[in-house]
Image: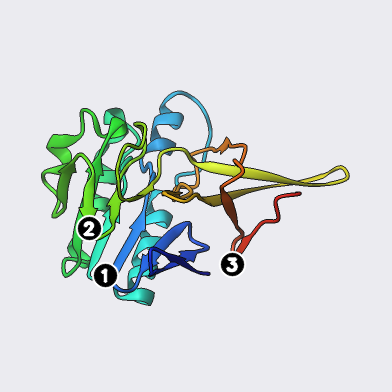
Amino acid sequence: MILKLKDQDFDLLPERAFYWPQEKILGLSDIHPGKAFTLQQSGIPVPSSDTEELLKIAQLISDYQPTWVFILGDFIHNKNSWNQQLFNEVSAFFGELKDIEWNLIIRNHERGSIDFLKLLPINIIEGDFKIGSFTLSHGHLKNTSATFTIQGHVHPVTTIRDGSTKLRLPYFVVSSDTMTIPSFGDLTGGFEMIPQENEKIFAVTSDSVFEMPRFI
């Protein structure tokens, strides 16, 4: 779904990412690889999904041919998520896509992982990144930018109800000065936000993005 922001086109993708064609930027946030391993170490039987998420990113790169990829924070779940298998998979992933300029805005979940991240071919950005009329941010702090901010962090989801049937969907939320994108990872959970009067929400299904009417 193409959304016009500040005279720029942004393609909101069902993979819970966005593509900015004028700048050839693919953007996503909150991947949280290693969360499955962390949960498994705590005795919670969840399937590992890290490889699937990396393959999903690789497919997006193949489809859109971006020059830059921006990860808006929370690339890794936490410092305890690293194991040899994950590090090998992540290293191989970046090795196969070395022609891309990778950028990571580090925030709360990267604490304790900087030494691992410095071994990868990725630009580590401390703080927000401004490009043209836009600021790319993780979103864990109050937005004080004078430019339009694109952020992650919140993992917004909404619930559609039809009688006893409920469908929980991630979504993009857009206001006059901010777009919050859904989490890219499958094990990240979600936060049910209450849309404000000046906000539009764009729900995500497995194969589409659509604007939700405010009365739902």
Q: Amino acid at mark 1?
A: Glu
Q: Nearer the viewer, mark 3 or mark 2?
A: 2
Q: Which mark is residue 207?
A: 3
List x then y, in percent, for residue 108. 30, 30
Q: Quadrant of residue 37?
A: top left
115 horizontally vs 153: left or right: left
Q: Residue at x 58, y 52 (%)?
A: 200
Label 1 crowd bin: few (<14), some (14–19), many (20+), radius 10 Å: some
Asked whether the beta carbons under mark 1 and mark 3 sit within 8 Å of each other, the answer is no
List x then y, in percent, for residue 211. 63, 60
> How far apart in space, not on screen, are marks 1 and 3 (Cα)?
24 Å
Q: Residue at x 17, y 44 (%)?
A: 125
Q: Secondary structure at mark 1?
A: loop
List x then y, in percent, for residue 27. 34, 58
Tell which residue pokes out farthest to the top in this image: 42
Label 2 crowd bin: few (<14), some (14–19), many (20+), radius 10 Å: few
Nearer-N-terminus badge (3/2): 2
Tell which residue pokes out farthest to the right in this image: 163
List x then y, in percent, for residue 141. 34, 31
Q: Nearer the viewer, residue 153 or 149?
A: 149
Q: Nearer the viewer, residue 46 or 73?
A: 73
142 horizontally vs 39: left or right: left
Q: Amino acid at mark 3?
A: Asp
Q: Is residue 62 above or below residue 184?
A: below
156 horizontally vs 107: left or right: right
Nearer-N-terminus badge (1/2): 1
Nearer-N-terminus badge (1/3): 1
Asked whether the beta carbons under mark 1 and mark 2 sit within 8 Å of each other, the answer is yes
**Residue wearing tag 1:** 23
